[in-house]
Image (cartoon, coloured by chain):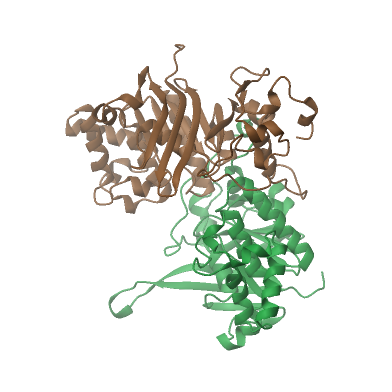
Chain colours: A green, B brown
């Protein structure tokens, strides 16, 4: 791949200040994203998985500059966007959009569907009233609704239909990158597949690049080309989707994969009843060395003393573990 | 094992009376729970799975009412007990845990205090004995440093630990039936696995029956012995878990199983979703609730609610679908 990646993230950090002493002395920091390197190629779907609190949503929100990064570099289509101010960011905002988890909370109930979908067009100053209305109708068709829905309010729709409205809004400006933050978690099982199929169709049709964040480990395998596994603000493993599932190198990935409930009772009961010990530590007081060592079956003194680097073990397969072997 | 089921539910029908009209949440649900088995109830939001259990426990909101049917627990109809008798039964013979433990725990009392209180109320134990019992229960549910965690408040626990506290509380009076409503839905997958394994282990040690309500087919496949598949307030299909997953006979069950990606195989093939969306229970379809989304729907499906047919392959395997009527055209099954 000689093509320039759409997104290049280098040593990105996002720390939140939490409390601190008198007059803000000795402040503590929640290290939500703590040194992430990541590239996203144009047209691919990069899945990002991890437990709640691992920093996957913060990473996405920092990338789209809803949060300002604490340090590090973020290049979008070759241009540095980590340090741009709001005005300089405007041209980039059009090119990256986000689909949120909760289609009930993310759509303003007092706006009609037409206003909701036209809002990004208005903000970006695209077209006039007439052409925007035509675009809204077109977008409604694209996401499997119809133009009669345009005058209705979001609360009149089911969860699956609302998520379609959210998607129409996200693609209104023909973005290149769409960040999907748990886009199907709030939906019923029978509706999830409808939305995933639609996202795949849109990707083909418009050449979209997806950053797909989820805790649903079976859906992420289906939709992603590559998958990154996050733990306490760091990427601990990154590989092509099948490679990751068939050949996981990091003990955390292995534990995560073996925790997935399998929708097949025979298969589910055949496997060993293993469970991962303990719970995710606080991102305020992180363990020394490897962040996973407090729950890791392989942990040694080395892991407490030294933080493992994310290294490439085989072609395109990265893991951050002292004991991971190719 | 005696032949009488621990819980026998027949014709259970529950409605909510709202300003917009009658919401028919549960419509003629039948099932049994035998002593010591795990029965999974799976369904999407609005399918009536939670309301079924809330009806049995008599914990419906004030605008909800059981319109018809009975729920016999060890022979006594729960729906006819006095409020006093019911309160004695809840938390004693029948215990429950919910999705969000934080809303079920009193935030102003230590967790130890809350469980000690339950034990004293239900069992009349001395304080000291009750306290000892709570320590044992905390050890049973694997809360580290059990004795010292008694004096912690609910907010000092993580989500997974809080659910362990809830389980300990539910077990405090040796229930014969534990109703668990989405107990792992709010938890991360690694913690979910810990809690599911814990529930299974406790079930096999203490021998109680469990009703596990969930929307997650994976969770059901992992732990349930028998399952009920609910849709539109009705039981669409019921049977042993292996039978239902290997050879589902109801188009809804088939559709549900087909719409989740298979984890173990490398697949980029397209998902097969169920078209349409779930029914509005203010105006449920006249016939089969699934008919508007069903690829096999016939004329009769739209007009009449199907009866429940016994399947030949397995005892207790039943399907509520016109396709299994003896006179139904057989070829329509092929497509599934």
In the displayed structure image, the side of residue B151 where residue B309 appears, left or right: right
Q: Quadrant of residue B94?
A: top left
The N terminus of chain A: image quadrant: bottom right
Total marks placed: 0
The answer to which image quadrant residue B16 occupies is top left
x, y percentage for residue B266?
75, 46
Q: Tell me if I can see residue B253 in this picture.
A: no
| Image x and y of residue A123, in percent | 60, 81
Q: Nearer the viewer, residue B90 or B24?
A: B24
From the viewer's perspective, is A202 left or right of A251?
Answer: right
Please state which of residues B65 and A39 is positioned toward the viewer in this rendering.
B65
Q: Is residue B39 above or below residue A129?
A: above
Residue B300 x/y as whole percent:
68, 31
Residue extending farthest to the right is: A2
Asked whether, in this view, residue A116 is left or right of residue B131, the answer is right
Q: Nearer the viewer, residue B335 or A294?
A: B335
Is A5 drawn above or below residue A233 in the view shown? below
Query: Residue A180: percent from the left, percent from the top?
Result: 62, 63
In the rendered image, the vertical position of residue A107 relative to residue B226, given as above or below? below
Give the residue at the far top of this rendering: B2
The answer to whether residue B30 is seen in the rendering is yes
> Toward the viewer: A104 or B284?
B284
**In the displayed structure image, the side of residue B98 where residue A118 appears, left or right:** right
Q: Is residue B107 above or below residue A199?
A: above
Identity of the residue drawn at 48% across and 39% down? B24
């Amino acid at each position: 791949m000689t093509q320039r990646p759409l997104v290049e993230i280098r040593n990105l950090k996002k720390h939140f200040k939490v409390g601190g002493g008198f007059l803000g002395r000795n402040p503590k920091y929640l290290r939500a994203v703590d040194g992430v390197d990541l590239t996203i190629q144009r047209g691919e779907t990069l899945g990002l998985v991890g437990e709640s609190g691992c920093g996957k949503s913060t990473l996405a929100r920092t990338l789209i500059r809803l949060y300002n990064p604490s340090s590090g570099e973020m290049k979008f289509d070759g241009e540095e966007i980590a340090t741009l101010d709001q005005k300089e960011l405007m041209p980039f905002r059009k090119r990256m959009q986000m689909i949120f988890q909760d289609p009930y909370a993310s759509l303003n109930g007092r706006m009609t569907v037409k206003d909701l979908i036209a809002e990004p067009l208005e903000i970006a100053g695209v077209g006039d009233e007439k052409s925007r209305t035509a675009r809204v109708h077109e977008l409604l068709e694209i996401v499997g609704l119809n133009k009669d829905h345009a005058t209705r309010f979001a609360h009149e729709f089911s969860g699956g239909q609302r998520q379609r409205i959210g998607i129409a809004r996200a693609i209104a400006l023909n973005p290149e990158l769409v960040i999907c933050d748990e886009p199907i978690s709030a939906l019923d099982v029978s509706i999830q597949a409808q939305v995933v199929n639609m996202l795949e169709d849109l990707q083909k049709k418009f050449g979209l690049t997806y950053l797909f964040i989820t805790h649903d480990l079976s859906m992420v395998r289906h939709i992603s080309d590559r998958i990154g596994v996050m733990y306490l603000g760091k990427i601990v493993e990154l590989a092509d989707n099948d490679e990751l599932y068939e050949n996981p190198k990091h003990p955390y990935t292995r534990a995560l994969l073996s925790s997935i409930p399998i929708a097949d009772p025979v298969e589910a009961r055949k496997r060993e009843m293993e469970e991962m010990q303990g719970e995710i530590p606080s991102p305020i007081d992180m363990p020394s060395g490897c962040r996973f060592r407090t729950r890791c079956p392989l942990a040694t003194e080395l892991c407490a003393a030294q933080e493992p680097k994310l290294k490439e073990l085989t072609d395109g397969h990265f893991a951050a573990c002292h004991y991971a072997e190719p | 094992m005696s032949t009488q089921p621990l819980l026998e539910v027949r014709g259970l029908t529950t409605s909510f009376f709202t300003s917009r009209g009658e919401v028919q949440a549960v419509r003629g649900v039948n099932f049994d729970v035998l002593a010591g088995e795990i029965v999974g109830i799976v369904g999407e939001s609005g399918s009536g799975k939670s309301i079924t259990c809330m009806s049995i426990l008599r914990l419906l909101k004030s605008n909800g009412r059981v319109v018809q049917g009975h729920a016999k627990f060890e022979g006594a109809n729960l729906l006819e007990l006095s409020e006093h008798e019911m309160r004695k039964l809840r938390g004693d013979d029948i215990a429950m845990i919910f999705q969000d433990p934080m809303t079920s725990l009193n935030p102003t009392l230590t967790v130890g205090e809350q469980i000690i209180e339950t034990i004293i109320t239900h069992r009349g134990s001395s304080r000291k004995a009750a306290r000892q019992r709570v320590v044992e229960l905390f050890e049973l549910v694997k809360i580290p440093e059990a004795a010292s965690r008694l004096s912690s408040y609910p907010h000092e626990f993580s989500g997974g630990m809080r659910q362990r506290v809830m389980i300990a509380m539910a077990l405090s009076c040796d229930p014969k039936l534990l109703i668990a409503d989405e107990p792992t839905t709010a938890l991360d997958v690694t913690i979910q696995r810990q809690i599911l394994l814990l529930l299974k282990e406790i079930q096999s040690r203490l021998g109680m029956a469990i009703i596990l309500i969930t929307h997650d087919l994976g969770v059901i496949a992992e732990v349930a012995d028998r399952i009920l598949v609910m849709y539109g307030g009705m039981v669409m299909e019921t049977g042993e878990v292996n039978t239902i997953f290997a050879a589902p006979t109801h188009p809804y069950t088939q559709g549900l199983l087909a719409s989740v990606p298979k984890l173990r195989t490398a697949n980029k093939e397209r998902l097969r979703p169920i078209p349409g969306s779930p029914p509005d229970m203010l105006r449920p379809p006249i016939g089969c609730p699934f008919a508007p989304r069903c690829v096999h729907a016939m004329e009769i499906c739209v007009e009449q609610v199907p009866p429940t047919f016994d399947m030949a392959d397995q005892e207790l395997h039943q399907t509520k679908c016109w396709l299994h009527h003896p006179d139904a055209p057989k070829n329509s099954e092929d497509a599934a």
